[in-house]
Image (spheres, grey):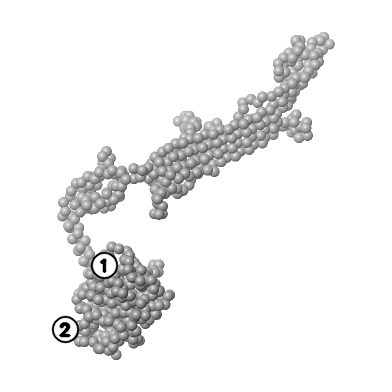
Amino acid sequence: MTARRFIGALGVSLIALGAHAGMVPLDDEAGESGKSGLAEVEEGIGSLPAQSVTNIEVHPEGDRVTVAIVGDGRFFPDAKLLDESRLVIDMPAVASAFRHSTVQGQHQLLKTIRVGHHADRVRLVFDLLEQPAFSVEAKGNKILVVLSPKESQGSHSEISQSANPLDVSRPALQERKVLFDSGPRTVKKIARIIGPAQSPFRVQPVQMAAESAPDQKDSRSDDVVAGQTRFVGRRISLDFQQADITNILRLIADVSGFNIVVGEAVKSKVTMKLVNVPWDQALDMLLKMNGLGMIRQGSIVWVDTLSNLAKQQDEEARAKDAKVKAEELIDRVFYIKNIQAQELMTSLRQYLSPRGVMQFNAGSNALIVRETESKLAIMRQLVEGLDLEVPQVQIEARIVQADTVYARGLGIQWGFQAANRTPSTFNAIGGLNGPFGEVAGTGNSTISRSWLVNLPAQVGGLPAVPGIGWTFGKLGGDFALDMRLSAGELLGLTKVIAAPKIMTLDKREAKISQGESIPFQTTSLQGTQTTFVDANLELNVTPQITSRDPKEDAKRILLKVRATRNAVGARSNPAGPSIDRREANTQVLVRDGETMVIGGVFVDTQNNNVQGVPYMSRIPVLGWLFKNKSESVSKQELLIFLTPSIVKT
């Protein structure tokens, strides 16, 4: 079995360091495969992994174009062709110091290069104008990507690949990087190995489908299963039996590109077999099963027992506390311009040290802080970030109230009068008082007069209803008939318009109220007391400036509105009248200067009343002599128009 076989595609790097100081060369069988278009670059083991991408250079060369990705160290790229027009290169554990998000291709094969910044990697997406032949080469602190027309790409000899695990048993002191091209046969990733092995171990290559498959997913996908830790490292396969844990950590260090420092207390033998798992997941499992932990600082990872790590953290915390206690306390005054100092103090108190003191002065609206210099610097930054000018919102309201009343009524009153005459008296009926005054006759009379049917017209809102009446009688007679017909009609239209304006701060409630206070009397052991209940129109508005769509020029205002209309009711009791309540609560999003309408506060009342003598009032036609009828229609409508506008300062 050969010491190393190269499988071109996604950058396989293999290093074997021996326990001896001498250098043992590797077998030359790999060189035979290298003649098929793959280049190997010799690089010293002292170069450090890259921390950031510093520049991207495009060099057109006739029908070919070369893109140089420059960094501050050695790269471990992961490249794949998503489709005919996109080539993706991922660089894990690398940040970007490159300021531009896109780079122009300046060539017929390359349109643009897009730079994506992620928490765990930098991704470059090559937007291609046509599907070219490509090769990717890691050389020193650069990655060279060469694009050329497909017909100009030289033929590549197929590289043999062993399905058996890679056996690394001989130490070596040399590093070789295998470049990859756009051939159809690829391998996802295998591990690089650093450090001598105490016992033989094997590294298995991971098979993958061809890059041209459209449904292939990146092994470092960002998909996260809910409730599970996210692992995004390169995938490796490990098979160990009673191996020293330090050797496994050295292997993971070489794969990840991180520098791993192992504590003296880390000593154990490990038996494990992992197939196609991310290296960070393998490291996490290795630490958990051996009761270990790690602390990461930049590109350095310190692995030690949990007790040693906790002890170190406690010592650092005590040293930090001692340093803080040794600092001198300084008094400083922060003058607050835009908000109340008392409100700001509530937010800042949690950042005080145990020795710190904070007070506010309402007169000057200032904060008085006694703290160390380092804490005062933090307080200054917080005050500058929180003491921002609060925008003001002017709310213009138009309140329109329209009342329409229509009522009519029809009634009748009639009766008769009679007198009893004796043979000794021949007086006529005199002093008969009808609806229109006294009737002829001057003699004394014993006539008794009253309404037999007394059902006058009733129209709501009118104190008296006009009518017309007659008195029928005979001079010298002993009988008289009185009759009066009454009819009334009422039509009223009331329209009230109010246009108040009010200004308030953002997220502060504004209140508009209009009406009267109704007195109520209550009796208790202390005596009779008078209380007042408001019967008014009240409007409470809380604006909040927000802009959800950055493409829109006009800002949006979220209005929280509560409209209340209380009025004196028709029912009454000895304690006082009733109160009719109408209330509407809503939240609406409007643009700056836009008008919103609150409607629906609408009351339509219809009354039909008939009063009469039982049975007699139901006789057709003649029944009108024994009843009255009234009708009324009342409509009340309330509309509220609100126009919020941001005050420009």
Closer to the observer: label 1 or label 2? 1
User: Do labels 1 and 2 touch, CB within 8 Å?
Assistant: no
The residue sitting at 27% across, 49% down in the picture is: 384
Could you say which disc has been placed on residue 55 in the image?
Answer: 1
The residue sitting at 41% across, 49% down in the picture is: 554
Residue 336 in view:
yes
The residues tagged by marks 1 and 2 sit, at their Cα atoms, a distance apart of: 38 Å
Q: Residue furthest front?
A: 62
Q: Compare marks 1 and 2 and give the one earlier in the sequence.
A: 2
**Residue 572 spot, x, y in % from top left:** 56, 33
Depth order, front residue of 435/203: 203
Could you say which disc has been placed on residue 139 in the image?
Answer: none
**Residue 174 spot, x, y in % from top left:** 21, 82
Residue 207 in view:
no
Amino acid type indicated by mark 2: Ala
Give neighbour class at mark 2: few <14, some 14-19, many 20+ (Cα, 10 Å). few
Which quadrant holds residue 12? bottom left
The residue sitting at 80% across, 14% down in the picture is: 475
The residue sitting at 43% across, 48% down in the picture is: 591
Give the residue pinned by disc 2: 21
Quadrant for the N terminus in the image: bottom left
Quadrant for the C terminus in the image: top left
Position of residue 169 relative to residue 380, above or below, is below
Position of residue 506 relative to residue 404, above or below, is below
Which quadrant holds residue 133? bottom left
Q: Secondary structure at mark 1?
A: strand
**Residue 266 spot, x, y in % from top left:** 23, 75
**Residue 195 spot, x, y in % from top left:** 22, 80
Depth order, front residue of 296/245: 296
Depth order, front residue of 298/73: 73
Amino acid type indicated by mark 1: Asn
Q: On the rendered structure, is 508 left or right of 96?
A: right
